[in-house]
Amino acid sequence: MSTAPYSIFDALSKLPFSPAPATDLVHYLIRSLAQEACEQHEVFGIQTYYRIVSRARDICHRINEYIVDVAVDHKDWEKYHKYTAQIAPLESLLFQVSQLIHEETHRKHEHRENALQLYIERFEHWKCHREIYRNILIKLHSAPFDACDYDWELDFKAACDHDDRAWLSIICEKILISLNIFAEKFQRHIMRFSHITAVIKLLAEIQIILEESETFDETRIICVTRCFMTIWGMIQVACDPHIDWAVSRHLRSRKTWTRILEWVERFKIAVCDFSVEIEILVEELTIIVEYVVHAHTEPQDVDELLQFLICHPAKVRRPYYAQSLALVRLCENIGGHIKTTHHGADIGKLEWYEYNWFSNDLIPLDLTFDG
């Protein structure tokens, strides 16, 4: 605990007097969560989280006061029933918060082959945990717990608004960090970099719009957060050396970011125009991202497919040059067959199984393989 700022820790966890044995577990959970509050800088709802711990500390102190009063007056059954009815629900809610923190910490270090999907799922967890934190705080101000002596509903709304704005700011900072990494690794791709920079500039403008708005629309803040986290994931995966090259290659393409730029321009208009159904627009982003993720298995046109197929065998030299040439010519024949059959149709609209079957009439008769 030497790394934690003790002023915050004491403010969140310290009780006026030593807790009774009946509240030992509650007090331990409060200290544990207070320590997490001091160390965690990216909790999804940090202000709501602070208020949960602070409110639990006040309830714990009130329960201990009831226990002291009952110890003095053994006939005070009203206070006895009050504190016995509060201990178990308080423990349950604090255990729930502890589990949420554990899940958030675990997700930060999770790795998966489809890394972009991990960022999209993280948005779903943010949305879910955001709702759970707020429901827990509401429960802590409801029966069987005693009422507090301040306007907690106004304070609750201010905390929720702060959490939403703060999380957007954190994502924007992470996007800029990812952009700097991308710029360092791919300095030659000036055109692609300019498209990504234009996208991030529009995201910053959207954030300013939300910051300056007096009324915070619940639907829009969720949609904007989903948009920010998805694009953050795209940039992060694009410059991650551990990601499969075929996936990251398409995430770095100019065509991809031109499409994203067009979408963000329309999204910015939708954020200001309350007549536009912004949820439908966000679903469109999901479709674009899914297409890009699977682009390495579903090329956009025949020429791109051929280029992908022949790039490796074309580099082969002796003693396997003859086999390499045979593979290249075979790919060219397959591409010509597809173009003739589908009359130049967009290959991205064809079923993938059409790429994988081979007919005898596609193999050139003059090709021979040594051995």
Image (cartoon, helix red, strand yellow):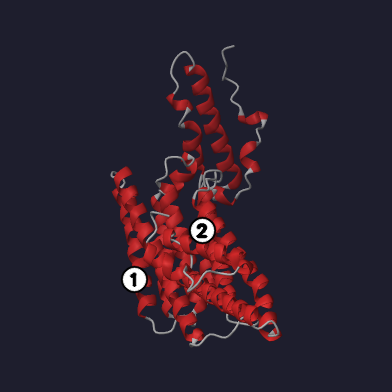
Give the camera-side residue of 315 and 338: 315
Estimate the x, y position of residue 361 in percent, counting from the top left.
65, 30
Q: Residues within 10 Å of mark 1 (few under 14, many from 20)?
A: few
Q: Amino acid at mark 1?
A: Glu
Residue 248, x across and y down, in percent: 45, 45
User: Is residue 343 in view from this perspective?
Assistant: yes
Give the residue at mark 2. Answer: 288
Q: State the residue in front, 259 or 74.
A: 74
On screen, residue 189 versus residue 249, left or right, reads left
Asked if residue 119 is positioned above or below residue 306 in the image, the reply reads: below
Measuring 37% from the left and 71% from the top, which residue is drawn there? Answer: 207
Can you name the residue that lies furthest to the front here?
Answer: 72
Q: Is residue 256 left or right of residue 138?
A: left
The residue lying toward the viewer, choosing from 232 and 346, is 232
Query: Dot 2: few (<14), some (14–19), or many (≥20) neighbours within 10 Å?
Result: some
Per the image, the residue denoted by label 1 is 205
Query: Can residue 186 be seen?
Result: no
Type of the residue with mark 2? Ile
Q: Could you tell me which residue is drawn at 31 percent across and 46 percent down?
A: 189
**Residue at disc 2, secondary structure:** helix
Viewer-nearest residue: 170 or 25? 25
Which-is-in-front pick, marks 2 and 1? 1
Circles 2 and 1 in contact, beta carbons < 8 Å: no
Q: Quadrant of the N terminus?
A: bottom left
Q: CA distance from mark 2 to mark 1?
A: 22 Å
User: Percent x, y for residue 297?
Assistant: 56, 43
- The numbered disc on residue 39 is none
Q: Is residue 145 left or right of residue 11?
A: right
Say which quadrant the C terminus sits in: top right
Q: Residue at x 57, y 16 (%)?
A: 369
* Mark closer to the chain start, 2 or 1: 1
